[in-house]
Image (tube, helix red, strand yellow):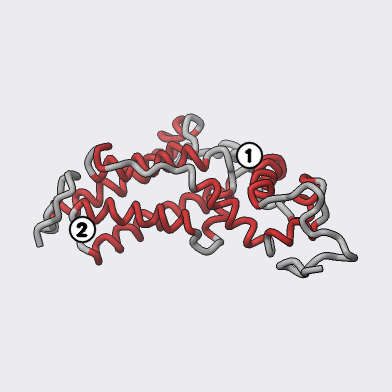
Amino acid sequence: MTAGRAGGAAHGEDPKGTRGLTERDIVTAALRLAGRVGFDGLSMRGLAEELDVTPMAIYYHVGNKKALLALVTDSILAGIRVPGRDAGDWSTRLLLLQEETGRVLGPYPGIDAIMIDSALTEQGRRLMDANVQILLDAGFDERGALLAYNVLHSYGVGRVTIESRLRGRPRPAGADLSNLPALDRIAGAVAGLHAADYRAFGYEAVVRGLRDLLQTSGVHRVDDGGAAPDR
């Protein structure tokens, strides 16, 4: 009998199992299980129980948890639609892409934090390419597009890190701000704000800053009609 990719069959057992398990079955079950226990609680043994197969059947198709998370990540990211040039100018397209990303990742809390700790996947590269292309269309040269993307990515990583650490924690009790007039003034607004509000404002602020940079740096801005920038 042929050994499986991650150690082979045990005691003559068919590593695929009698159900004809597929990679798609595994990804679907992993998403279902993560919806109940969270991505931090996702394990190969738990996934095997979810599918009612032995762990060896999982390892036959997916070598380890890292590979599993890459498959799950790509499955989710594949649902993100990149706005075309007819969707608006470059800044509109960037914000639409961020909104679309948030919409697709929203039902999977914690997956964005998983992605930060993982290598870039095929779908991750697709989305990185889309962001960089929009920045090139805006009129940034190659160096500028790379730096601008890094700013966008750094903000996103920072925002996700904060949200992942705060997820599930109760809001702290109100402190005495009587001697802190500025904090006291904004205290009432905190309850009405959510993670999506902070994220949307942050991305808009970054994009507006990039637009101002283009306008003041002498870089020729390109409309999204597909014309190449003047060099």
Number of marks in the rendered image: 2
- Between 31 and 212, the residue placed more toward the observer is 31
First-in-chain label (2 vs 1): 2
Residue found at x 47% / y 33%: 193
Q: Quadrant of the C terminus?
A: bottom left
Give the x, y percent position of residue 216: 13, 54
User: Which picture quadrant has residue 5?
Assistant: bottom right
> Left of 89 or right of it: where is 44?
right
Question: In this rendering, is residue 191 above or below 167?
Answer: above
User: Which picture quadrant has residue 204?
Assistant: top left
Residue found at x 24% / y 64%: 142
> Left of 69 or right of it: where is 181?
left
Residue found at x 59% / y 54%: 71
Number of other residues with Cα within 10 Å of mark 1, as a class: few under 14, some 14 to 19, many 20 or more:
few
Number of other residues with Cα within 10 Å of mark 2, as a class: few under 14, some 14 to 19, many 20 or more:
many
Type of the residue with mark 1: Pro
Helix, strand or loop under label 1: loop
Question: In this rendering, is residue 68 above or below 28?
Answer: below
Residue hosting label 2 = 140
**Residue 170 shows which numbered tag?**
1
**Residue 213 shows which numbered tag?**
none
Give the x, y percent position of residue 135: 26, 54
CA gap between label 2 and label 1 equals 43 Å
